[in-house]
Image: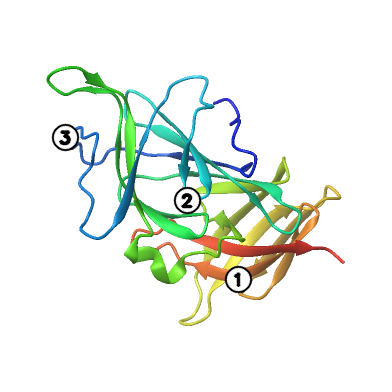
Amino acid sequence: MQPLHGHALAFALFIGSCKESPPRPILRDHPCPPGASCQSLADRGPPYHVDDDVEGASVALDILWDGHGAFEVSWRAGPDALPFRATLFVQSGALFPLRGQVVELMDCHGPAYNGWFTEGPLANLLLHSPKGAAVAPASENVFVPFDAGWASLDGDRIAMAGSVETSPGDVVARVWAHAGDGTAQKRYVRVGDPFLWSNSLATVVRIVPATDGRIGWIEVKLSRRN
């Protein structure tokens, strides 16, 4: 996968694998629920620099013949407009965050013959999914996914997170993040706790458990270090 060459306002990267499960008819215009907003993203092929805009996020799609694929979503975040990058793997029906919203991957599939010609790969997203409305991140924030992937900030500063079993009402996550001085931050966090990530201070705004189709993630607010 080659890097995106996104719009001037977009410069982060999200990569996600999707699987068609179970197989369904190939539809260029996937039926969208009444009153909802949906978007079909087509695989434009190499060199993967032609992208679609999804409400402020720049998205390029690469789906292979076996139905596996990758999303690339980009924007800048924080007071210094740093490039944010997250990498995760999802399947049809999964709920995951994008800039300022939670979307649902309705389906994705590789190229297929529709009876007249071979249609290229595409994925269909339900935007602002009602299932994720209560946990939609603020548009200025970023996220670190649980166990299913990782994120990076300002280039190669990696962060990973995992959920931790706790008593009812006490949500804790473990975080591992690269700081700007090359050290690694390894700690358990709750909402309101800060940790160093690259040259920024990342404060936990919300911890979203991996339930009800959600992949699970930590929403964080970036600020300058003192």
Compute the Cα span from label 1 to label 3: 40 Å
Amino acid tagged 2: Glu
Label 1: few (<14), some (14–19) or many (≥20) C-alpha neighbours in 10 Å = many
Task: Place residue 87 in its image quadrant.
Answer: top right
Q: Is residue 115 left or right of residue 189?
A: left
Please give the residue where the numbered disc 1 appears in the rendered image: 205
- Expressed as whole percent of the image width and height from the top left, the position of residue 22 reads 21, 41
- Label 3: state its secondary structure: loop
Circle nearer the N terminus (2, 3): 3
Q: Residue at x 20, y 32 (%)?
A: 26
Circle nearer the N terminus (1, 2): 2
Marks 1/2 in contact by CB < 8 Å: the verdict is no
- Expressed as whole percent of the image width and height from the top left, the position of residue 109 reads 29, 32
Against 220, residue 176 (above or below) is above
* Front of the two marks 1 and 2: 2
* Front of the two marks 2 and 3: 2
Frontmost residue, 94 versus 5: 5
Label 2: few (<14), some (14–19) or many (≥20) C-alpha neighbours in 10 Å = few
Task: Place residue 80 in its image quadrant.
Answer: bottom right
Q: Residue at x 16, y 24 (%)?
A: 114
Q: Which mark is residue 55?
A: 2
